[in-house]
Each structure stands twice: as structure tokens, then as C-alpha cells.
Amino acid sequence: MERPDDDVPLGGWPPEDEPREVTRRTFLLLGMGTIGGLLALAYAGLGLRYLWPPSQAKIELEDVGSSDEFKVGDPPVLKVTHNQGSEGGAWIVRLKDEGLVAYDMHCTHLQCPYTWAGTSFSCPCHGSAFDIHGNVIHPPAPRPLRRRLVVEEGGRVKVGGIIS
Ligand code: FES
């Protein structure tokens, strides 16, 4: 459609009652721009979450049993939790010197679930081992077990998110 030099309608060009043509190029540019914008927003969200991660300690406490289940000298007990819809867990043990502690159930090497092997925690994936205080006694785990918030209220033990 050619634009006439004179007699331009007041509503602009092309007149509103005539459909505008969307070329393939315009359509592709709009589509790529939209996808690029969404990706930029997603990366910005991830960046903000990395810079200001949500506090794990504020995860709702979950009741994992009676205080009587955890006595000094007893072996650690694995309790499965379902915080925020995802299944997790903590090894809970009452230590003579520290009281009740909860270790996140995932190895600090590559996140495999580990087990209690009688005298230490043992990871089946690459052989890491941790003592009863969560310290590394056999690498490749680079750091001690992560601890989760654990509290006793009214004779019940409750576990929260990772605190260290
Ligand atoms: S994940 Fe536990 S040793 Fe590698």
C-alpha cells in the first residue's frame, strides 16, 4: 500500500480501519525479543537469589518425634522431613557435650545421602566419613556436615533448615 502525499487521514497512516501487515521479520524479531526479555528476567531472578539467598533457618520447624527418642549414648537417628514440599532429612543425635544436634542428611562432597556406620557417618558414593560431631575424618568431603536447626519444645523435637 502506497502512502498518498496528500489527503492523509487524521488518525495517522495507515488508516485504522485497514489491517497492518506484520512481516515475518517483524514477527521473528518480536518473538526473539520476548524470549530474550524472559531469559534476562529469569537470570536476574537467579542472580538476586544468589546474592540474597532465603534464610534456611526460617524454614518452618517440623516435628520429628519425642525428646525421649534421643538419649545421650544412643546412635544417631535419621528423620525424614518434608519442608517446602521437598523431601529432606536430618540425622539427629544427643551429644554429651553439645546436646541435641541435627545434621543435614546430604554429604558435603556431592550431596549423596550418607548413613550411620556404627562408629561414624559413611558416604557410599565416594567414601567420605564423618565423626559423631560431623567433622571430616575421611575425604573427599571438603567440610563438616551441615547442621540444621533443631529445638525441643514441650517434649517434642523439631527440625528446621540448614544453619551452618
Ligand atoms: S558424595 Fe559423599 S563422598 Fe562424594
Image (cartoon, rainbow, N blue to C red):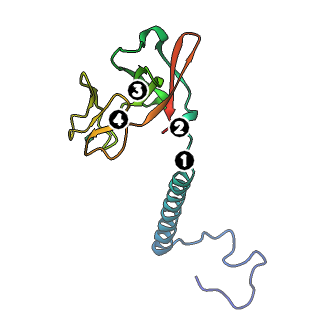
Q: Position of residue 62 (x, y in %)?
A: 51, 22
Q: Nearer the viewer, mark 1 or mark 4?
A: 4
Q: Is residue 80 left or right of residue 158?
A: left
* Residue at mark 2 to residue at mark 3: CA–CA distance: 14 Å
- Which residue type does callout 2 highlight? Gln
- Which residue type does callout 3 highlight? Ala
The answer to which of 109 and 44 lies nearer the viewer is 109
Disc 2 + disc 4, Cβ < 8 Å: no
Give the residue pinned by disc 4.
Answer: 106
Badge 4 density bin: few <14, some 14–19, many ≥20, Cα 10 Å: some
Q: Position of residue 39 (x, y in %)?
A: 48, 60
Q: Position of residue 138 (x, y in %)?
A: 24, 40
Badge 1 density bin: few <14, some 14–19, many ≥20, Cα 10 Å: few
Q: Secondary structure at mark 2?
A: helix
Residue found farthest to the right: 10
Going from N to C along the chain, the mark reached first, 3 or 4, is 3
The tag on residue 56 is: 2
* Residue at mark 2 to residue at mark 4: CA–CA distance: 15 Å
For the N terminus, the quadrant is bottom right
Going from N to C along the chain, the mark reached first, 2 or 4, is 2
Badge 3 density bin: few <14, some 14–19, many ≥20, Cα 10 Å: many
Ligand number 1: quarter of image: top left
The tag on residue 53 is: 1
* Residue at mark 1 to residue at mark 2: CA–CA distance: 8 Å
Say how many tags the image has.
Answer: 4
Disc 1 + disc 2, Cβ < 8 Å: yes
Quadrant in which residue 44 is drawn: bottom right
Give the residue pinned by disc 3.
Answer: 90
- Please give the name of the residue rendered at 50% of the width and 58% of the height, measured from the top-left corner: 43
Badge 2 density bin: few <14, some 14–19, many ≥20, Cα 10 Å: some
